[in-house]
Amino acid sequence: MARIQGHTPLYGALGASRIIALDMGAPAAADPDYLVTSTDMKVGVYTIVTGHGTLDVPRNVTVTLTRQETVDTLGTITVTGTDINGAALTEVITPLDNTTAYGTKAFKTVTKIEGTGWAVNSGTPDPDLITVGFGDSLGLPVLLSRDSVIRAFLGGNKESAHPTVAAGATTLAASTIKLNSALNGTAVIVDYYET
């Protein structure tokens, strides 16, 4: 199973910024129903697929809703688990009508997924359907106060476009990177300035 394996200084003088080569393992492609396969929306705890509570690398959680006739009152989904260092982590994601909502925090493990505030539409006999999975935003093992990423590589090839970087200056799980290319189970390397 792939994991963020650490970082290697490339160069830099004492007291100055260094360029770090970060090996982020070989993250799998985004999987919209990895954690919860298609099921009726509800108020309560959803069943996580057996053996899927630990993600290949820390990454964001996604919630995909499929409308059944008229959209329900969607409420929120609370995801509970841990970050890359094993610290407790919670995020509230609001489902979106007939599309995917993307979380912004990187979970290494997911231990609980709970729906609150949902209500079936009074004119529709069938509740909307939901899946919960993971996306392409990967958790960085360092707090970033700004985007200090220089370049990223996927499968040994340099990305032609700069990745999307979220700086989580005070929250490790909010420091994430999303490559321009879709992840595909090949190696991801990120070079960044350590400041």
Image (cartoon, grey):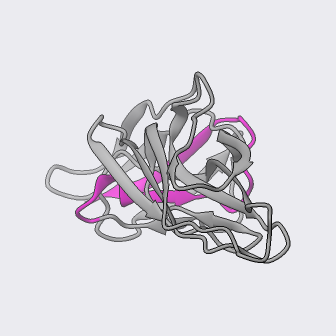
- Near-viewer residue (112 or 27): 112
- Near-viewer residue (187 or 101): 101
Q: Most extreme residue toward the right, as rendered?
A: 69
Q: Which residue occupies 39% across, 65% down?
A: 148
Q: Which residue occupies 74% across, 62% down?
A: 128
Q: Which quarter of the rendering shows the C terminus?
A: bottom left
Q: How many marks?
A: 0
Q: Is residue 125 left or right of residue 59?
A: right
- Near-viewer residue (146 or 74): 74
Q: As displayed, is residue 103 above or below residue 73?
A: above
| Percent x, y of residue 97 | 71, 74
| Percent x, y of residue 106 | 45, 50
| Percent x, y of residue 101 | 62, 66
Does residue 18 show up? no
Q: Is residue 154 left or right of residue 190?
A: right
| Percent x, y of residue 90 | 35, 53
Q: Which residue occupies 43% across, 62% down?
A: 92
Residue span colored magenta: 169-195
Q: Which residue occupies 58% across, 22% down?
A: 51
Q: Which quarter of the rendering shows the N terminus?
A: top right
Q: Is residue 131 magenta?
A: no
Does residue 41 show up? yes
Q: Is residue 186 magenta?
A: yes
Q: As displayed, is residue 52 above or below residue 164?
A: above
Q: Quadrant of residue 29?
A: top right
Q: Is residue 189 left or right of residue 144?
A: right
Q: Is residue 188 left or right of residue 9?
A: right
